[in-house]
Amino acid sequence: MRVLGFMSGTSLDAIDMALLETDGETIHAFGPAGERKLSEETRAVVLEATAQARAWRRGDPEPEVFARAAEAVGREHLAAALDFLAEHGVDPRTIDLVGFHGQTVLHERPAGGVIGRTVQLGDAEILAKGLGVPVAHGFRLDDVAAGGEGAPLAPIYHAALAGFAGLATPVAVLNLGGVANITLIGEDGQFQAFDTGPANGMIDLLIQARGLGRADIDGRYALAGQVDAAALKTLLAHPYFSAPPPKSLDRYDFPLEVVEGLSTEDAAATLTAFTVAAVRLSLDWFEDGQLPSTVIAAGGGRHNPAIMQGLREALPARVISAEEAGWRGDSVEAEAFAYLAARTARGLPISFPGATGVKAPMSGGRIVRP
């Protein structure tokens, strides 16, 4: 199948797109990839939806803004797809399927016997009708309903990608988005995966809150600052880090107030150190014999020299970028949802005990047809 995959992360920066030739098991070929920056209008309505989602009590009616945000996200993805396909001379009719993740505005992990909640907004029908192509979406819903974490879902693709590239195992794939997640692929091809902690998310929120842009570009604030040991200790005392996997996070699970009294430089340095320390702690959950010799960094965080420098100093493994492994680091997640869409269409499992904590591998997702 020729599948177009999308990913729009919690950083609310851009829509990533990638074409993948796959049957959901084997990767046959990579098509073009690209991105489209989110418009300020869509970003604003998603931020409003996120704020209301965080205040949304269980049992209450769904916030009205969800429908407006879903429509805006759907239309933004359609415009992105049409421009992307035209740029690369691809007729939409030659695409078999679309994998549409949507925009996450809420993610609550299960706790105390209560199932979690996860909300990804995006009107899949807008895409299906606009492109004339079936659209797979709602990938996390069945897993959460079955008591799983709903995340991470990309590990099955990470394992396929490592196999395609012929990488020696054990190897780890570290996705540095708003939240960081790590996938350890063992010598037997089996994988374990979970969210390690924030990646870019808290740093982005800091920079945005102080009116200095959307992100710490090139890590310039962090590299100019000093880590506040007390603030870092407070952040690392969060019970999430002592909880065993499987486990998952929302971008807003850690308080930004911890660094409120620090200069921008010191706050950015401290939050960057927090990202790195959380990744280092994640390795403690892997068996000694399965510790990776190489960690491959993908996602936007790999562009931040402060994060990458910190990881290379802190991890007992070689840390390389996705590009150094021959991958497209900005497109791995979009490729992953193309791959998951193909698996959804074939009824293959998309979530697994070693990643989301479900009792057995399970299929998921919904397909909307034009």
Image (spheres, grey):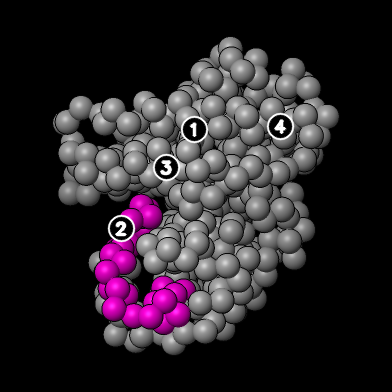
Question: Is disc 3 in contact with disc 1, using a CB cutoff of under 8 Å?
Answer: no
Residue 155, given in percent of the width and then of the height, sits at 54, 49
Nearer the camera: disc 3 or disc 1? 3
Task: Estimate how packed mark 2 is, as few (under 14), some (14 to 19) or many (20 or more) residues with alpha carbons within 10 Å.
Answer: some
Q: Which mark is residue 83?
A: 4
Look at the picture and state if 307 lies above or below 354.
below
Which stretch did the figure color magenta? 243-272
Q: Give the mark nearest the N terminus, 2 or 3.
A: 3
The alpha-carbon separation of the residues under discs 1 and 4 comes to 15 Å
Q: Is residue 42 left or right of residue 32?
A: left
Q: Give the mark nearest the N terminus, 4 or 2.
A: 4
Q: Is residue 245 visible?
A: yes
Task: Estimate how packed mark 3 is, as few (under 14), some (14 to 19) or many (20 or more) residues with alpha carbons within 10 Å.
Answer: some
Disc 1 target residue: 73
* Quarter occupied by residue 207: bottom left
Q: Which residue is at 51% across, 18% downward?
A: 125
Nearer the camera: disc 1 or disc 2? 1
Under circle 3, the secondary element is: helix
Which quadrant does the C terminus fall into? top right
Q: Is residue 66 left or right of residue 73?
A: left
Q: Give the mark nearest the N terminus, 3 or 1.
A: 3
> Does the magenta run of residues contain 251?
yes
Under circle 2, the secondary element is: loop
The alpha-carbon separation of the residues under discs 4 and 2 comes to 35 Å
